[in-house]
Amino acid sequence: MSAVVTAEANGQKATMPAAIVVEKIVKRYGDFEAVRGVNFTVAEGEIFGLLGPNGAGKSTLIRMMTTLIPVTSGRALVAGYDVMKDADAVRRAIGVIPQALTSDQDLTVEENLSIYAKLYSVPREQRERNIAEVLEAVDLLKWRKAETKTLSGGMRRRLEIARGLVHNPRIFFLDEPTTGLDPVSRIAVWEMLNNLKKTRNLTMLVTTHYMEEADRLCDRIAIVDHGTLVALGTPVELKQSVPGSNVVEVQFARESDEWMRRLQALPDVTDVQSQSAGVYRVLTSNGSKTTTQLVEMAASLDEQIGSLSVQNTSLDDVFVHYTGRQLRDEQVKSVFVMPTRPGANP
């Protein structure tokens, strides 16, 4: 496949072959467009995230790329194969983990994996070897004879991941892989996926609505809202694209309609977001200076500050910047894509 993408690997940018190419893809149900002309590429060996709220179109995108539903218009190439013209070839090259836990609870861990490997026509000797390898990779080897219904939620999610790998796919799709897991189990899944990427040379596409998950797990992130791609880049690039390098969160003891205007008038402030009654997030290019000015302003007005904190720009701020209330109520901004090297596809 000739398509390439500039992506970050081991802290450095490089131009690599594209494992997934999505071009002006649309999914329409009657008059409703669930996905609206989305474009992106995924480099071989990277973890690519689709970040967005529930109903944004993430699952629809992944279902089209995995041949589960037809594309209305545009095209998607997965492992070099067109999902509409070469669906069987695409299915042989991918592993898929859906949101729901679908392993048979009455079967053992090993039996679930064996059935799945047989569906992919994995030869018996290779099947036994693959099962042992994937169970070791997800740290379930000692539970291979256990009935699935006896496993915890985190262990069942690891079993789902093992099942998706048992036929040695080149590309791995994970739809909301940590939904319903406790924080400890969620972090364990992140660590496991990062290790699998390195040891098995996997390309992964992950959908998520967890900001921390996208930030810690993904090499690049596409933010999707209302079926449209609104931003694309590495976590660092996306944070840098938001005006203001710091966020000052302040709570005033007394509510006033004037706080928004006063905060916006401070030097270096690029945006002010009202969070709740009396609580504001202030984006600024100089956090320490803005904090000092804010305290002085409150003192001059004889107002009390209930709480005050300064932090770096987060993916939450990126998400609000590109998919804020004004965007939802009026229109979606033009897509922001980090510039690539000359001659490289976005």
Image (spheres, helix red, strand yellow):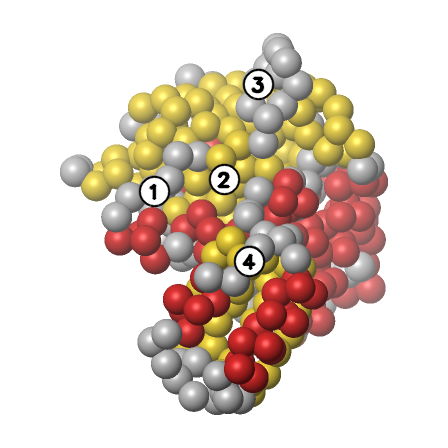
Q: Nearer the viewer, mark 4 or mark 3?
A: 4
**Is 20 rendered above or below residue 317?**
above
Amino acid type at circle 1 is Val
Amino acid type at circle 2 is Ala
* SS assignment at label 3: loop
Which residue is disc 4 drawn over?
267
Which residue is disc 3 drawn over?
345
Earlier residue among tags 2 and 3: 2
- The mark tally for this picture is 4
Residue drawn 17% across the image and 37% down it: 30
* SS assignment at label 1: loop
- Residue 292: % across, % down: 65, 71
3 and 1 marks in contact (CB < 8 Å): no
Q: Which mark is residue 160?
A: none
Q: Quadrant of the N terminus?
A: top right
Which residue is disc 2 drawn over?
231
What is the distance, in whole Å, between disc 4 and disc 1 at their CAs? 28 Å
**Quarter of the view holding residue 334:** top left
Which residue is disc 1 drawn over?
332
What is the distance, in whole Å, between disc 3 and disc 1 at their CAs? 23 Å
Q: Nearer the viewer, residue 302 or 244?
A: 302
- Drawn side of residue 14 relative to residue 286, left or right: right
* SS assignment at label 2: strand
What is the distance, in whole Å, between disc 2 and disc 3 at their CAs? 16 Å
- Drawn side of residue 230 relative to residue 294, left or right: left
Earlier residue among tags 2 and 4: 2
Q: Nearer the viewer, mark 2 or mark 3?
A: 2
Earlier residue among tags 4 and 3: 4
Q: Nearer the viewer, residue 173 or 131?
A: 173
What is the distance, in whole Å, between disc 2 and disc 4 at their CAs? 27 Å
